[in-house]
Amino acid sequence: EIHIKEPIEKEVKPHLLPGELLLCEASTVYKYIQEDGSNRGTYGKLVCTNFKIAFLDDDSASDDNEPQFKNKIVGENDITLQCVDQIYGVYDEKKKLLTGQLRKYPEKLIIYCKDLRVFHFCLRYTKEEEVKRIVSGIVHHSQTPKLLKRLFLFSYASAAPNNTGKYGRNQTVMFDTVEDWRDELERTKGNVKYKAVTTNEGYRVSQKLPLYFVVPICISEEFTNFYHLVNVFLQIWCWSCHNGAALLKMSAFPKEQDDSTSQMQKAFLDGIYKTISKPPYELLKTDDLSSSLPSLQDIQTAYTRFKQLFLIDNSTDFWATDVKWFSLLESTNWLEIIRRVLKKAIEVAECLERQHTNVLLIEESATDLCCVISSLVQVMMDSYSRTKSGFQSLIQKEWVIGGHGFLDRCNHLHKNDKEEAPVFLLLLNCVWQLVQQYPPAFEFTETYLTVLSDSLYVPIFSTFFFNSQHQKDTNTSGESLKTQSGPFRFLTVWDWSVQFDPKAQAFLNNPLYAEKPKPDKSQRKTTRFKHQRQLSLPLTQTKSSTKRGFFREETDHLIKNILGKRIGKFINSSDEPPNSFREFYDSWHSKPVDYHGLLLPSIDGPEIKVWAQRYLRWIPEAQLHGGGTIATAAKILDLMEEVQSLQVKMDEKHSQAI
């Protein structure tokens, strides 16, 4: 009934990384190739280590069929333990979710991965002892709660102590020194009104805050010392626009607390608002993201529904869902969430660019949707964030140092499903919309974004495996973690050479990127003027006179709102008429695109698309054989190489002639 390729008794050894240990294995496991519903496949060995689950067949020993784009750390039949989403066992043709202790062992194992791969293993021909060992091993190591120190990240870092971690510091700004923040202030001309502070060195003030951060220049030192009393993530500067308006973020105050604390917070806020309501600071507009955007719970629910459309068992399933594809897609609500997030980012960009207003984003912890919106606004408004090193620096600044809880949101330790939410994936999905609408504006490709989303689950980089800078620092300095050559350093995901060789890395860079022309002095003034003219649209008349004094009468009102009382209409401060957004949006879209100026995504209905490369790449029925974007990219890269080699030849000829 099955066309069987007899297993060759040839010992296939798994390729182990430093610090990687083989935990259990099973031989004569049959892996289905799930293309056509027939039971074709190959025999091999299924192994589980403290880093990954891997299937080794006879082919994996040979290098003949090497793909052009290959990951050096995670092979095509490897699943890191963090990448396992769900495991099902098949008992008499019935699927059952496997968690915890098992009484009966399945004859088939189906593993669904977070990068949307699906593996089918048949265990009928495997010895019973080995089946027990491998199934319980895989379920235990990938599905049960674990301690942070048990992550492979630590085993790898201590076994490979020569990681200097100094890679590419010249390109990606890590934001772990006060100089990095000062350089960023200088780059965005924000240093006129804001300053980097070192009050939190050694986490003296708060463990929630990064070691270094930026506050308005007029806030005194003892004021920043006050942060720990208020115990909030207060007023952190994200970015300054060319016209001086700035993007800020802060956490909302906790709702339940005694009166004395809220009195103190009120006084504290009062002081802050008094200082930044006076010139030279722009008007301030606050935006409470927890009331104007979907909740994390909604985002998680939508994504869970959405990914089910791509975790397909076989060809029959694919064609069955294909008939109802559009209604299924719409019912997940995922694309609608992306649209709402992009719309919010455009609203914030309008305030900064056209109304010259400071925008303060407020959210419960200021480390989830605040990170999404502030990053998107910078990608849209600052062409530096659209270069590869600029985008990586942006993620370091807003997410890694900004305290996004990667560990909880990705549920790497399987501690708490309620905390899980694909917030970072949401950002990558939104950026992808911009990349596919304006390819020449980005130095990186969609392949770069796909690979970055996969790296969320590779625990040899520390980038996505901590909740905060404080948590990382306290776990690096422990006595037990000293290696022979001194304290170890974690790898950063931005060193792409760890995962890809140069030929594969070429796919991460966009050969059609429209590089910024270097203007000469005489042109510089005019281009600047054009940019200003293009965007300064006549503002609809608003009662501007009252706005200046609004702080004096409104501070009290504002504080009440922020302290968690009923959020009034004020927080969305809808002074300007609602159609001003549409006017700004339509006006921008009616002009030719400046790839180095402001970029606004198209957000009307059909413009928001599914990120096909990430979600459909493992489904054979959805592939264009020998075609598609990646084939085009390969062709362009070949052409580029040819052009460059011709250029070299011409230069040689030229120099010989001279």
Image (cartoon, rainbow, N blue to C red):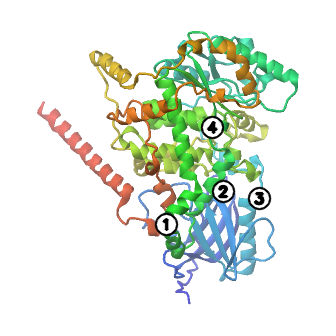
How many other residues sit within 10 Å of disc 3, few (<14), some (14-19) or many (≥20)? few
Mark 4 or 2, closer to the camera = 4
The reply, left or right, for residue 434 in relation to residue 517 is right
| SS at badge 1 | loop
Mark 3 or 2, closer to the camera = 3
Mark 1 or 4, closer to the camera = 4
Q: What's the amino acid at mark 2?
A: Phe
Which x, y percent locates residue 13? Answer: 60, 67
Residue 116 sits above or below residue 420 on the image: below
Mark 4 or 3, closer to the camera = 4
Question: Pointer 3: what residue?
Answer: 144
Which x, y percent locates residue 156? Answer: 66, 48
| SS at badge 4 | helix
Q: Quadrant of the C terminus?
A: top left
Q: What's the amino acid at mark 1?
A: Ile
Question: Pointer 2: what residue?
Answer: 51
Look at 49% across and 47% down and name the residue there: 449
Q: What's the amino acid at mark 4?
A: Ser
For marks 3 and 2, the one nearer the N-term is 2
Residue furthest out toward the bottom? 1
Look at 30% across and 22% down and name the residue there: 519
Distance Cα–Cα, label 3 vs label 2: 14 Å
Distance Cα–Cα, label 4 vs label 2: 40 Å
Question: Pointer 1: what residue?
Answer: 619
Can residue 169 be seen here? The reply is no
How many other residues sit within 10 Å of disc 2, few (<14), some (14-19) or many (≥20)? many
Distance Cα–Cα, label 2 vs label 1: 26 Å
Residue 365 sits above or below residue 633 on the image: above
The reply, left or right, for residue 366 in relation to residue 526 is right
Distance Cα–Cα, label 4 vs label 3: 36 Å
Residue 314 position by quadrant = bottom right
